[in-house]
Image: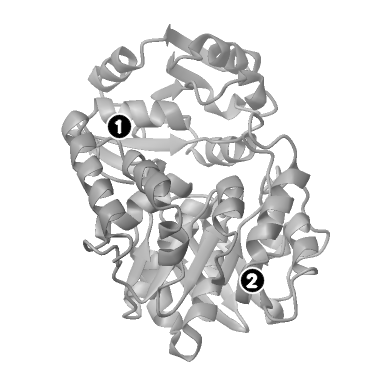
Amino acid sequence: MRYAPAVLAGKLTRIAARIRKPGGGSAVPGLVVNRIAPGYLKRTLSGFPQGLVVVSGSSGKSTTTKMLVAILRAHGTRVFTNPSTANISQGLTSALLEQADWRGRVPGDVAVLEMDEGHGALVMQGVDARVVTLTNVMVDQIDRFHDSEMVAGMLGRIAARAREAVVVNADDAYLERLADKVGSDASVHRFGVSAAVLSSAPRGLGYTETAAERLDPADGVLVSSVDGSSAVLADHGRDVAVGLPARGIHYAVDAAAAYATARVVLGERFSAETAAAALSSIPAVFGRGERVRVRDQDVDFVLVQNPASFQLNVDAIPAGTEQLLFAIGSDVRDPSYFWPVDASSLGRVAIVSGSKAAEAALMLAYDGVEIDRVEPDLARAVDDFLAAPAPAVGVKTIVFSADSMRRTRAHLGLTEAE
């Protein structure tokens, strides 16, 4: 009852925000509630009967979270989760308000939350998680995280709140060192890729530091093979075939992370068959290899958020893709951030757009990519790109940073929650 006035204020704020801007204003109610009742978020996160599961890391946390939620729900578990755009404190509070009753209680057996590395370290102060899953450490968001040691330290603080288990990527040397520091109260579980899978990615998987040795199949969940949008997971001597939401080894790694975490959360109730079926049926996550039907045509959305994800996703675009729109927005404050990426495999781009269009075009040109047009006005670029004749091979593909993704989706009326 102590939080009822704050919850009411938050819900009214949410209604007002949605009236003012349909599909927007998702963080505003959380800001209001956090200001009025600063203890609401921590109290609610600690109140789920089967505990709290946190997924964090530089990259892959959105897809891993969605996969994990799908597996748990397929096992009959009621799950509360947050949209991947709501992974900081005010967003998390807003996500809770979406489903809370007037007293602030949120239904669900377990909460599975994606958390931003920096905000997660703050949110988890005073909050215990049952399980914490860490995906990787990459060079990411240089305006916020100036080095990988800083990111690893934040993830370490999140992992320290785990009371039952920590699930880590065994191929990430930073996370392996972090796992060595996990207290005796929490067990450590691992996922990773086989030597053959790693060797099939000549540029690696984008981690700041890749571990020297591969995970032994007896010690965790291993991605033993990847073929396009399907993979085989080795689960303690058993091969489990799974479908992936999009092409790429990184999606197979996300699947292994979700599978390994579900094993820990469900215990004896875990079924490999049920998990495989759930993994194989989920769609791509909001721009991450997502195929969208818009204006009577299929369009692939490819989100790039840091140099590693940029490289992995560009490499995964099918060879011969004829029509590409490339858009970099204001979220990339220093475009030189992306210069280490080799984008030469794109070959030719129809339109380069976004607020950083000129800088992006220069970067692509140095990689030998042919550019038909530079159009800073993103709305005009999207309209012209979609109005062009259908490609003879493949589908139209839009590669964008987070800011341009949000603007593109809003322009196309794709305002559903992530």
Confirm or deny contact between disc 2 and disc 1 (CB under 8 A): no
Q: Is residue 400 left or right of residue 141?
A: left
Q: In what quadrant of the picture does the N terminus appear? A: bottom left
Cα separation between marks 2 and 1: 35 Å
Q: Is residue 385 above or below residue 101?
A: above
Q: Is residue 63 above or below residue 216?
A: above
SS category of the residue bearing label 2: strand
Please name which of the two marks, 2 or 1, marks the residue nearer to the observer.
2
**Three-letter amino acid code at the position of disc 1:** Arg
Identify the residue shown where x is 38% and y is 55%: 82
Q: Is residue 274 left or right of residue 248?
A: left
Of 279 and 26, the residue lying toward us:
26
Characterize the local packing of mark 2: few (<14), some (14-19) or many (20 or more) Cα atoms within 10 angstroms: many
Q: Which residue is mark 1?
A: 409
Q: In which quarter of the view is residue 362 placed?
A: top right
Q: Is residue 284 in sight in this rendering?
A: no
Of 301 and 413, the residue lying toward us:
413
Residue 406: where, in percent of width, then height? 36, 31
Q: Is residue 235 left or right of residue 382?
A: right
Q: Is residue 113 in sight in this rendering?
A: yes
Identify the residue shown where x is 32% and y is 42%: 291
Q: Which residue is mark 2?
A: 166
- Residue furthest to the right in view is 212
Residue 393: where, in percent of width, then height? 36, 32
